[in-house]
Image (cartoon, rainbow, N blue to C red):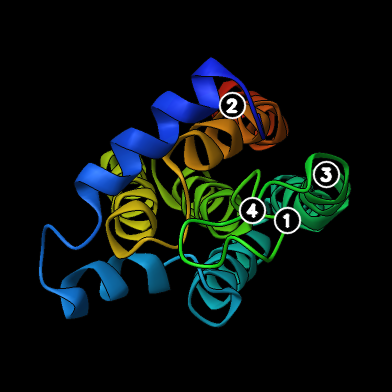
């Protein structure tokens, strides 16, 4: 994670990718993982789901978002991996922005319509790609967040399937 052959490969890959696109574009992608962008999307989807009588699903989606910092922050502290642009700073592994984007956008998609899942995937991929191309995170930081957040999406998926069975 912070040292070794895989970390060195990750760092070489990152150096070859940083600033390959205009900074405004990579910054735009990275910003999709900000709490000020992703959280209102999830909150609106939760309100819509609650209004439609899917309060449990909305609760589970919100719980997933609450768990993001509870999982990410201790891992950042434990690994203390330095960042691409700030090698003196630590706490880059895993990416909190990627985790926030994934849980918020996929949670919103599961609450509103499964047809939005490709949009959630695109927004999450744009966030992770923007973070890497801008140099804010190493590629493994982003991949670790995706792997970490898959279990957090289990509850909204299960509650969505359960709700659809009750409608039939």
Residue found at x 75% / y 51%: 68
Could you tell me which secondary element the residue under label 3 belongs to?
helix
Residue 30 higher or lower than 8, as above or below: below
Image location of residue 165, percent across then percent down:
59, 21
Residue found at x 12% / y 57%: 20
Give me the C-alpha separation between circle 4 and circle 1.
6 Å
User: Label 3: which residue?
Assistant: 71
Q: Are marks 1 and 2 in contact (CB under 8 Å)?
A: no
The disc, 4 or 3, on the residue closer to the chain's N-terminal end is 3
Image location of residue 117, percent across then percent down:
35, 39
Question: Dot 2 surroundings within 10 Å: few (below 14), some, or many (20 or more)?
Answer: few
User: Label 2: which residue?
Assistant: 147
Residue 44 higher or lower than 42, as above or below: below
Image location of residue 144, percent across then percent down:
58, 32
Q: Are marks 4 and 1 in contact (CB under 8 Å)?
A: no
In front: 82, or 43? 82
Q: Is residue 7 left or right of residue 57?
A: left
Would residue 12 be visible to someone looking at this image? yes
Question: Dot 1 surroundings within 10 Å: few (below 14), some, or many (20 or more)?
Answer: many
The disc, 1 or 2, on the residue closer to the chain's N-terminal end is 1
Question: Dot 4 surroundings within 10 Å: few (below 14), some, or many (20 or more)?
Answer: some
Give me the C-alpha separation between circle 3 and circle 1.
13 Å
User: Label 1: which residue?
Assistant: 91
Classify residue 89 by image quadrant.
Answer: bottom right
Q: Is residue 57 left or right of residue 116?
A: right
The disc, 2 or 4, on the residue closer to the chain's N-terminal end is 4
Give me the C-alpha separation between circle 1 and circle 2.
18 Å
User: Label 4: which residue?
Assistant: 82
């Amino acid at each position: 994670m912070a040292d070794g052959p895989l970390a060195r490969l990750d760092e070489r890959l990152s150096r070859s990718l940083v600033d390959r696109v205009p900074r405004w574009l990579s910054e735009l992608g990275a910003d999709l993982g900000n709490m000020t962008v992703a959280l209102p999307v999830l909150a609106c989807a939760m309100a819509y789901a609650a209004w439609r009588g899917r309060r449990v699903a909305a609760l589970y989606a919100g719980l997933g978002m609450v768990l993001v910092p509870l999982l990410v922050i201790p891992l950042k502290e434990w690994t203390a991996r330095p960042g691409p642009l700030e090698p003196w700073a630590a706490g880059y592994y895993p990416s909190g922005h990627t985790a926030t984007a994934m849980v918020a956008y996929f949670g919103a998609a599961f609450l509103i319509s499964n047809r939005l899942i490709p949009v959630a995937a695109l927004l999450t991929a744009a966030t992770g790609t923007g973070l890497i191309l801008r140099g804010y995170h190493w590629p493994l930081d982003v991949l670790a967040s995706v792997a970490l957040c898959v279990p957090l999406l289990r509850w909204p998926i299960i509650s969505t399937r359960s709700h659809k069975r009750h409608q039939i």
